[in-house]
Image (spheres, rainbow, N blue to C red):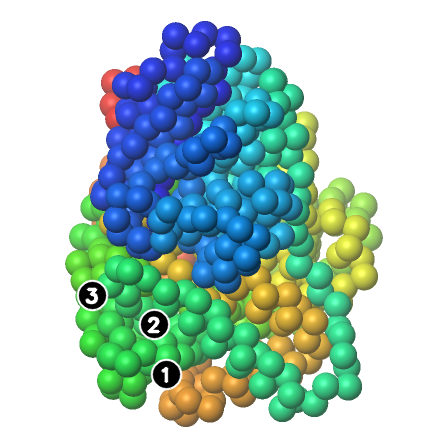
Amino acid sequence: MCGIAGAVETADPSRLTEPVLHRMASLIAYRGPDNQGAWLSPPVGLCHRRLSIIDLSEAGNQPMSLEGTGLTMVFNGEIYNFPELRAELEGKGVVFRSRSDTEVLLRAYEAWDVECLDHINGMFAFAIWDAPRRRLFAARDRLGKKPLFYHARPGRFVFGSEMKSILGYGGIDRDIDPHALDEFLSTGFIGAPRTILRSIRKLPPAHYLLLEGDRITIRPYWDVTFEVREPERTEEERIEKLEHLFREAVRRRMISDAPLGAFLSGGIDSSAVVGMMAELSDRPVKTYTIGFEEKGYSEIEDARVIAKHFGTEHHEFQVRPEAIGILPDLVWHFDEPFGDSSAIPTYYVSKIAAEHVKVALGGDGGDELFAGYTRYQESLRVPPYHLIPASVRRGVLAPLADRMPLAAPGRNRLYAAAHHAPLTPGYGLGLYPYIKGQLLSPEWRAQTAREPNGHTAVSEPRLRSMDLLSRLQYLDTKVYLPEDILTKVDRMSMAHSLEVRAPLLDYTLIEYVATIPPALKLRDSVSKYLFRKMASRYLPASVFEKPKQGFGVPTGSWFQRELRASARERLLDSRTLNRGYFRRRTVERVLDLHEAGQRDYGTWIWCLLVLEEWHRTFIDADTRRI
């Protein structure tokens, strides 16, 4: 795992210097503390921060060039099938000078050009300068585990693993995209290709980019297809196939020349990963768990059961309200507003793991892959709001719901009927849309009213042929998973120079599970039906008896008690209110209702705090850090 950045500068070549490249790299030093490198060949410059995982020698340092080819690359991530690819390329006569997967990837591009993406299994973001063709080739992995941002204008193209490297290049406008901010206030995240700044874009997952002169071409190279195949397969045959793919996914992610461990929540997904690691390892697995004092949020006891069952070397940490003091650090690492408060425990579990290992496996992806979210079940039995004519919902119910007081009985139900949108990625994430209309100032609402919000995946034609469950899984896999879950894990783990790998997001596993009938994922009220059957072969029965528990944070109680005064002071501060986004009266009402226990607006309060901290960190001239 590493950090990459670079530029192609033809408008003003004198701007691109080695000191500039080193500044861009140093801003993300935590992504790779083991080595910093830069390569400059005007009009192109590449820089890299290395976290040594495979081939710890200097031969694996980057930027990496292939002598005599004119190819130079910077790469962030891991290629899990690099041993097989290396053997295939050696069969073609390729001679390698290192044991690194970086060189394998570069040789794969030399052999197969852009089609190298069809051959690799991994998590990655990379950029290759192809001097003979005078082009830059960049790509992002299929699920979006690794980030890639870019700024483009005539004569200048700047990219990086994080936005701060691009800002570090200098000369980048910081105008806020009002539609991106509106998306943050609707979902808690900002989806590709937008970012919070108009001048910077995200390369979407499973896409590649070609820069030739000033012409940029962006194309997809992979997608997941939900289509039932081989219906004659028996349940037992499907379990055998699933277990084989899962075992291989875990095995591939255990390849490391650096110490390795696992996140353990006590839920089915992470427990299954730890169980398979224990089966494949000849030594105890190192496991790491986070908990809270508040009941209903901590999974420490559940994790202890699994740790004892598999004899792991177990470590725990308990998060308390004062942990919210890391907010400035969180905002610095996310680069743009990010509203998922589970970033707090993710930050701390990464911190304790990084004290012992450089690589950790996690259970991310299981809910999207096997239909584990309770909201999937809720959606299948949701009141038939769609039967209400759209004209009635928008023309009658919506204005009525928007005018009702925040605490009015039945307001949220009426709002849900008026704004019914079951195919919104990450739908049901708390209270995001329910008070936005009353919270935003009229001036700011006017700026976002002209353009429809929402992710392009919602309008995919292929959705029409899918059953409702598959549609929801597809959208969460394409939007909520990369933009929320994987963004959170990447930034919080990299903050501590820790690489996190997700076996359940191996694309071969995803492609297979997408062909399994929906009834084998969600059967009656049993979620993850087939995965449960497989995991029951080696997990204790208690794992399957516990109720579903998300990776939540008790922000509701924190903002009622310990953090009440500090939240009120920051959100009603004149600097905050003078930004013009929100109505003071509504902010006060939100705080009053929450503190009185009449409504739980903890999610909203957290998002508003994040947004204000982001402005002070990246926008305000007197306080910004870069």
Please identify the quarter of the rendering in which residue 583 is found: top left
Who comes first in sequence, dot 3 or dot 2? 2
Give the side of residue 374 with respect to residue 20, left or right. right
Question: What is the C-alpha distance between the residues marked 3 and 2?
Answer: 13 Å
Residue 334, image x, y percentages:
37, 41
Please identify the quarter of the rendering in which residue 553 is found: bottom left
Residue 345 visible: no
Rendered position, 330 above or below 7: below
Quick one: SS at disc 1?
Answer: helix
Q: Which residue is mark 1?
A: 279
Residue 250 visible: yes
Residues 120 and 26: in front is: 120
Q: Residue at x 65, y 88 (%)?
A: 237
* Label pair 3/2, CB-CB below 8 angstroms: no
Q: Residue at x 36, y 49 (%)?
A: 98
Number of numbered tags placed on the structure image: 3
Q: Which residue is mark 3?
A: 318
Q: Which residue is mark 2?
A: 265
* Label pair 3/1, CB-CB below 8 angstroms: no
Residue 265, image x, y percentages:
34, 72
Which circle marks residue 569 in the picture? none
